[in-house]
Image (tube, grey):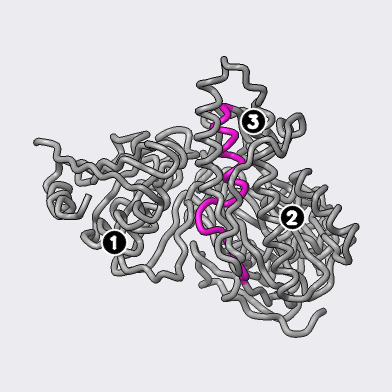
Amino acid sequence: MIILGIDTSCDDTSAGVVVGGTRVLSNVVQSQVKLHHPHGGVVPELASREHLKNIMPVVREALQKADVRMSDLDGIAVTVGPGLVGSLLVGLYYAKGLSYVHDIPLAAINHLEGHILSVFLEEEAPSFPFVALTVSGGHTSLYYVKGYGSYTQMGQTIDDAAGEAFDKVAKIFGLGYPGGAVIEKLAREGRRDIIKFPRAYLSKDSLDFSFSGLKTSVSLYTKKWREKKKANDDVVLADIAASFQESVVDVLIHKLMKAREEKGVEEVVVAGGVACNGRLRSRLSKDASSGDIKVYYPRPEYCTDNGAMIAAAGYHRLFHGERADLSMDVRSKYPVSDLLTLVSEP
Amino acid sequence: MKEECVIYRTRSAGETVDLGRQLGGFLKRGDVISLAGELGSGKTWFTKGVGLGLGIARNIIITSPTFSLVNEYEGRHTLFHLDAYRLESLTDFLAAGLDEYFYQEGVVVMEWADRWPEILPERRLNVEFVIKDEHSREITMSGYDPRAVEILKKMEKVKR
């Protein structure tokens, strides 16, 4: 089955063509990210207008790169939520139009299911059940994944997402965007153990995350550090970056491992933009080599928002006979627990 | 019109939430609350409180809308939690359709709303956060529209 996946849930317009839910023929992302942005954030000229401008060329390019025509497609998968309503509408209505005109089955996809299943676009993929950590600018959540369509949320951030903390700390430092890459690079030169920033483990059994206290702590520390910089203080900005990053990584790994133990599974998946963080990966691979756990990651281009992961999710839904009818609407809120479980595996 | 203002001092995130809860209890459909203050000054935690005051279930977690730009929660009234932090210009704000939320059936709480005050409805209540030290915040509520003054009169009775 050849599936076209479309995602317009946030800033990026993306489309990908995937065979059998695993083999990527193309993955095209029209990104709004501009480096060194003065305000330290994504430039969302985005919204509906940008998506509207981008959607046709992006889909056309995805089909061209995959060397398939509309008539070759067995299905179209499109993100219907969660996300910004105006942005989601562009993707959904375009997909509906294609589906209707070319008479191709349509699948309505939850963006978070796309992230959870993005790891199946890799040759090395986990087997069910596993625990997934999706960690990005907008999300920090833990899921117990029993099978396709069966996702139980075990924890989530109660304030800021981890990726958001990276971006905001980069802003506090007066550095550019994207914050994750900027902080990671700076942290390589710094000492991780020089400043003890708080680690919010919350209550003993909690699998929830909190990063706003850490952000505030880094902000106050940086302010004080700037003021007394003239004094003979050997702390440099890279030390603050490294200590901050270590605090985030400590908490992410602690909670991920706790969730894994709770469910008694050996395999874990880390997906989303922050999964690209080198320090997180090296710490996890150390854990993996010393114990009997196995960690899976999608490659960076499948970690950020993309159409290929939506196509992968769509493949399983269409394979099981799920069809979205043309009256389908977008959902700004859309918990993955609302999804239909796909019982048998293809 | 004369601007009214009430100043509070909170000593923990919990107290900031509680102040938000008191305000949330007085809010009705159409109210717009503009939040201003630097990173980490308590805007999101204050909004958690407003949500509680609006009767949003405790198990519904109000998180930062920085990336999503807007989060929606169902309570006694719908809460639209907006965030202008990562928008570059007023054009971006309008392109994202965020101004439409001011005219929806619900309560709007908007973070970083002081970036383009000209876009905000006059009936808004302004809330400004200043970090005094690690845990303590000075929170100033102000407004001059009759509706804002009405809310402030009620808030004056809240213990400071």
Q: Which residue is mark 1?
A: B105
Q: Residue at x 77, y 71 (%)?
A: A130
Disc 3: host chain:
A
Disc with the residue nearer the chain's start (3 vs 2): 2
Q: Bin the neighbour count of mark 1 within 10 Å (Cα to Cα): few under 14, some 14-19, many 20 and up.
A: some
The quadrant the N terminus of chain A occupies is: bottom right
Q: Decide which of B159, A341 is in the foreground and name it.
A: B159
Question: Looking at the figure, which quarter contains the C terminus of chain A?
Answer: bottom right
Q: Secondary structure at mark 1?
A: loop
Circle 2 sits on which residue?
A16
Residue lying furthest left in this view?
B1
Neighbour class for label 3 at 10 Å: few (<14), some, many (≥20)? Answer: some
Type of amino acid under label 3: Leu
Q: CA distance from mark 3 to mark 1?
A: 38 Å
Q: Nearer the viewer, residue A30 or A183?
A: A183
Question: In this orientation, which residue lies closer to the viewer: A123 or A321?
Answer: A123
Left or right: residue A68 versus residue A252 is: right
Spatial separation of the CA atoms under disc 3 and disc 2: 24 Å
For label 3, the SS is loop
Depicted B123 relative to depicted A210: above or below:
above
Q: Position of residue A84 (x, y in %)?
A: 50, 54
Q: Amino acid at mark 1?
A: Glu
The magenta stretch spans which residues? A153-174
> Which residue is label 3 attached to?
A35
CB atoms of marks 1 and 2 within 8 Å: no
Q: x%, y% of residue A109?
A: 63, 67
- Mark nearest the camera among 3 and 2 is 3
| Residue at 48 percent of width and 33 percent of height | B88
